[in-house]
Structures are given as C-alpha cells and as structure tokens.
Image: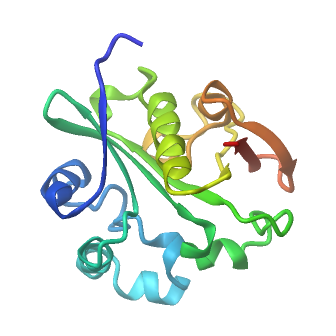
C-alpha cells in the first residue's frame, strides 16, 4: 500500500476527528456506529443526534469503541472493534449469532472516507484493529462482511461491515456462512 497511515484508538482526544470523519450524516443514515449496540427500536428512535450522543457517552466513559486510521493528521478511516458482548444485536441475529462459546472481539463496522476507498485502507485498518484487540487480551477476532454478487451490487458506503476480500488479505478465514452473502470470518490472535 502506498498511503502512509497511522492508527489511534478512539478516546476523548480523538472525538473531534471521529466527528469530522463521520460528518453530518453520522457516517451512514445517522448510525454513529450504534446499530449493533442497541435494540432496533432504540436505534431508530435516536437515529442521528441521539446515536451521536450515545457514542460520545461510550467514549466519555473511557471505553474504546474502535480504531481511527489517519493519513497525515486527517482521520480517514474507522473500524469499530470491541468484545462481542458490546454488541447485543449480534446475539439476536439469526445469521450472525455466535458459532460457539469462545470469547471473541468483533469487527462491527468499517468506514473509509470516500476519496480513500479501494486503496487498501480497510486491510490495514483490520490489521491495526486486530493488534489493538490483542493488546487488550483478545485471542480471537470475528468479522461479518457482506459478499456482493458483483462490485456494482453494493455501493461502498453500504459495505459498512467490510467485504470478505479485505478480511482475507488481513489474515481472516471464513468459518461459517449461514447466508449466501454473509460469511463469519475469524482471525486467531494467539
């Protein structure tokens, strides 16, 4: 990859960078990376400003909800990564429910600034996020990418869980597929 990147866990000091990256729309439709953390009803009722406040409360509490990728001093990418238990909506998902009883961390979202997409940022961000999880004691990371039937089937902004090709290049392996378009991929960290 030819883009020089650095990575930072999202903490209070990076909040403004996160807001700048996500923009007025909260990355996609007012999500602010809260979809997997809430019930669908909660998520819909606080879409936009409410989800932003909820994410800010997480950051203010000292919890690190993910990793930012920087090019020079600009935040250009985001990877939500946390213990799977941080994402109760995953437990309710018919397709993405746990495979086994192993404790893992989950990659819940990848968001790359438009002008940096298709340049390998997702791969490097997945690697950095996995290293961060390992530094926090994680032994296993899972991802839930979407498999488009073709490149044109899914607009990049809506591939917010990533695509399998990026996970494979970051060292993940597919372990189960309960739907034609939604593999569960894992990376062993030990």
Q: Is 24 on the left-hand or right-hand side of 76?
A: left
Q: Position of residue 50 (x, y in %)?
A: 28, 82
Q: Is residue 142 above or below residue 71?
A: below
Q: Which of the 4 quarters of the picture holds residue 10?
A: bottom left
Q: Is residue 164 above or below residue 58?
A: above
Q: Quadrant of the C terminus?
A: top right
Q: Quadrant of the N terminus?
A: top left
Q: Position of residue 55 (x, y in %)?
A: 31, 73
Residue visible at 85% across and 50% down in the picture:
177
Residue visible at 57% across and 66% down in the picture:
83
Residue visible at 46% across and 29% down in the picture:
124
Q: Is 112 on the left-hand or right-hand side of 38?
A: left
The colour mode here is rainbow
Q: Position of residue 68 (x, y in %)?
A: 32, 45
Q: Is residue 60 above or below residue 32?
A: below
Numbered circles on residues, count: 0
Q: Which of the 4 quarters of the picture holds residue 138?
A: bottom right
Viewer-closest of 138 and 128: 138
Q: Which of the 4 quarters of the picture holds residue 65?
A: bottom left
Viewer-closest of 83 and 75: 83
Q: Position of residue 131 (x, y in %)?
A: 51, 41
């Amino acid at each position: 990859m030819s883009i020089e990147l650095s990575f930072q866990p999202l903490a209070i000091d990076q909040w403004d960078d996160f807001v700048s990256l996500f923009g007025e729309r909260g990355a996609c439709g007012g999500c602010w990376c809260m979809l997997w953390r809430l019930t669908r009803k909660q998520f819909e009722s606080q879409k936009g400003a409410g989800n932003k406040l909820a994410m800010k409360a997480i950051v203010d509490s000292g919890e690190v909800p993910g990793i930012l990728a920087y090019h020079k001093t600009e935040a250009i990418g985001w990877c939500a990564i946390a213990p799977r238990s941080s994402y109760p909506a995953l437990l309710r998902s018919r397709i993405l429910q746990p495979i086994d009883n192993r404790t893992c961390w989950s990659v819940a979202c990848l968001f790359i600034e438009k002008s940096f997409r298709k340049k390998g940022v997702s791969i490097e961000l997945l690697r950095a996020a996995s290293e961060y999880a390992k530094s926090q004691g994680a032994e296993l990371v899972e991802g839930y990418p979407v498999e488009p039937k073709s490149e044109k089937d899914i607009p990049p902004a809506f591939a917010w869980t990533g695509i399998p090709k990026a996970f494979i290049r970051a060292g993940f392996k597919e372990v189960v597929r309960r739907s034609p378009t939604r593999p569960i991929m894992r990376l062993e960290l030990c």
